[in-house]
Amino acid sequence: MAGNTGSTGSRIEPGMTTDFKDRMDYGSYLGLDLLLAAQKPLSDAPDELLFITIHQVQELWLKLATHELDGAIAALRNDELQPAFKSLARVSRIQAQLISAWDVLSTMTPADYLAFRDALGQSSGFQSYQYRALEFRLGAKDPRMLAMHQHHKAHHAHLEALLAAPSLYDEALRLLARHGLPIPAECLERDWRQPHVSNPAVRAAWLTVYRDTHRYFDLYELAEELVDVEDQFQQWRFRHMKTVERIIGFKPGTGGSSGVKFLRTALERSFFPELWELRSEL
Ligand code: HEM
Ligand SMILES: N[C@@H](CC(=O)c1ccccc1NC=O)C(=O)O
């Protein structure tokens, strides 16, 4: 009986495999030995495990979100709107998970955090390579953010490549142009290392879409999915900023920034500015 037994008395159901000596099992497929060995608190403070776990879970979701965004960007480039919508809808659901994780972390009080904050040295979310990659894909281009990845050549090179490539929004604008909407040439070929700056002609093009949704239904759906993604990204930033204020007040950050004051300025940056501006004109 080839490995699908177990002694009759201890079998859960007939035919179930219990011998995994030479078979792939749950943990080996998922790499769980590696994953679950990666939580290594540096202090004896009880909440450091929570802190590490939240960050690791966020990084895993960030990995999946960027994978889906890559798919969405490629689909837009190939004029495949339905697959792009599917990926963007998934990104949105992932973002909901990222946002709700703040509820768990905000159970940590200032005293709980201060018990291990010193152990963090100068490390900080500032140095999250995946977060920066996501921001670059969404169009928040800022070459200054490369500097803190100099010590990791592969990350640095990947971020350089993303900085120099069109973002999700750049591809959306190129798609609009292919659909016959008048997008200025300077938005279709430009130095992608710079962020897109709000442009009145782009706003007018999106307004055309929003004023005739019947004719441009696909583009309208695309626009609303983009708004969803930015809306949730801002909710994440807001929850981060408020959680930080609740836990460390206005202390400077370990990464060297002014802390909450710096995080507040990020809330003013929009990925898809025209999609927000046009709402006042409808
Ligand atoms: C106790 C919890 C946390 C505190 C006190 C905190 C504090 C800060 C501060 C002060 C900054 C500004 C940079 C600096 O000077 O260090 C920052 C940046 C950042 N943090 Fe956190 N953070 C916390 C949790 C998290 C979590 C759970 C994540 C999720 C991965 C995260 C991701 C980031 C990212 C990506 C940045 C860079 C933001 C940007 O460049 O706009 N942080 N954090
Ligand atoms: N910047 C935080 C430290 C911090 O939150 C952090 C430290 C190491 C790894 C990830 C972190 N999370 C987000 O910034 C602080 O100033 O307390």
Image: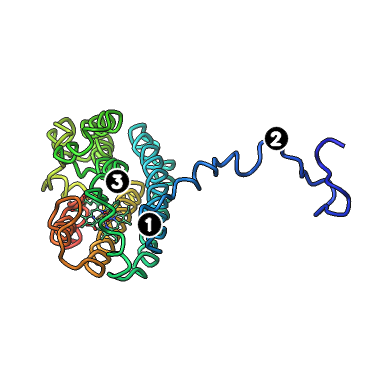
Q: Secondary structure at mark 1?
A: helix
Crowd class of label 2 (few under 14; some 14 to 19; many from 20; radius 10 Å): few
Where residue 102 appears, x then y in whole percent? 35, 63
Q: Which mark is residue 23?
A: 2
- Are the two marked residues, 2 and 3, in contact with CB atoms closer than 8 angstroms? no
Front position in the image: 43 or 150: 43
Q: Which mark is residue 2?
A: none
Q: In the image, 259: left or right of 22?
A: left
Label 1 sits on residue: 98
Where residue 160 appears, x then y in whole percent? 22, 31
Q: Name the residue located 29 percent from the left edge and 31 percent from the top edge.
A: 158
Q: Name the residue located 37 percent from the left edge and 67 percent from the top edge.
A: 103
Q: Name the residue located 26 percent from the left edge and 67 percent from the top edge.
A: 247
**Ligand 1 within 8 A of label 1's CB?**
yes
Q: Quadrant of ligand 1?
A: bottom left
Where residue 178 appears, x then y in whole percent? 27, 34
Question: Which image quarter holds the C terminus?
Answer: bottom left
Crowd class of label 3 (few under 14; some 14 to 19; many from 20; radius 10 Å): some
Crowd class of label 1 (few under 14; some 14 to 19; many from 20; radius 10 Å): many
Between marks 2 and 3 in the image, the one whose residue lies nearer the viewer: 2
Question: Which image quarter holds the N terminus?
Answer: top right
Front position in the image: 83 or 281: 83
Kindly identify the amino acid type of the residue bearing the numbered disc 3: Tyr
Kindly identify the amino acid type of the residue bearing the numbered disc 1: Leu
Between marks 1 and 2 in the image, the one whose residue lies nearer the viewer: 2
Kindly identify the amino acid type of the residue bearing the numbered disc 2: Arg
Label 3 sits on residue: 131
Where residue 79 appears, x then y in whole percent? 36, 35
Q: Secondary structure at mark 2?
A: loop
Query: Residue 30 lies in what quarter of the image?
Result: top right
Q: In the image, 124: left or right of 3?
A: left
